[in-house]
Image (spheres, rainbow, N blue to C red):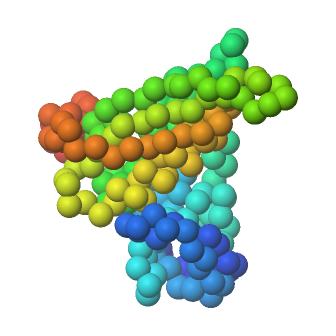
Amino acid sequence: MNRERTLTREVIATQIPSGEKMPLSPNTRVFIHQTLGGSYTVQTDFGLFRIDGKDGDAVGEAAIDNKVDATTLADGAPDPEAIWAQLRQVFDPEIPVNIVDLGLVYSMDIEKQNGPAPTDSPAYRINVAMTLTAPGCGMGPAIAEDAKSKILLVPGVNDADVRITWDPPWNQSMISEEGKMKLGLI
C-alpha cells in the first residue's frame, strides 16, 4: 500500500514534537507513518505532523469520527471510564502502544468547579499527571495536547490539564501486559 499522498485541501496539523498548531497547504506531499488513536502521523518536507482523523479525506483516507459515545453520570459529572477510554486513544507517534498501556499516565482526577453564572451548574475539569519514556523525549507537548483534546470530547468535561511529571521515573515494568505483547516484550 502506497502511504505517500498529496493533501487535497488545507488542514490544521499539530507539529511534532512542539505541539504547535499550524496549517498545511493543499498539494503538500505527505507520507503517512501511523494511523492510530483517531489521527494520522505524517512526514512532510517540513517535519513530522499529526493530522486529526476528521481530516482523513485530505490525505485520501476515510475521515475518522472521534465522537465519544458516552453519557454523563447522574450528577452531570463526566464518566471516568469514558475519560480513560479517550486516554487509550493517545499514542506516541513512534510507539504503537497507547499512553495508558505504556504506563505513562500516573493519575486522572475529576475536579468539580462552579459553572458560569447565571446557571451556576457544575463544570468539570480533568487533571492528568503523566510522564514520558525518557526525560529527553521531545514529544511531551504533542502528546499532552493530543490527550487534552481527546479528553475535552467527553460529555461533561469543561476543561482539562495534562501535566508532564518525571516523578517517579518511567520504566518498562510500568507497561501493561497488553502493551508488552504489542511490543513483543513477552
Give coordinates of residue 36: x percent, y percent.
46, 53
Q: Is residue 52 left or right of residue 71?
A: left
Does residue 185 show up?
yes
Determine the residue positioned at 20% across, 55% down: 135
Determine the residue positioned at 70% across, 12% down: 74
Give coordinates of residue 22: x percent, y percent.
57, 74
In the picture shown, does residue 186 fall above or below 143? Answer: above
Give coordinates of residue 49: x percent, y percent.
47, 70
- Pick the residue in front: 5 or 69: 69
Determine the residue positioned at 57% across, 33% down: 125
Query: Quarter-wise, where is residue 47 in the image?
Result: bottom left
In the picture shown, does residue 170 fall above or below 55? Answer: above
Give coordinates of residue 129: x percent, y percent.
36, 37
In the picture shown, does residue 123 fall above or below 51? Answer: above
View extreme (top): residue: 74
On the rendered image, what quadrant is the C terminus found in? top left
Query: Quarter-wise, where is residue 180 in the image?
Result: top left
- Pick the residue in front: 124 or 155: 124
Q: Is residue 68 left or right of residue 145?
A: right
- Pick the residue in front: 48 or 118: 118
Determine the residue positioned at 57% across, 86% down: 28
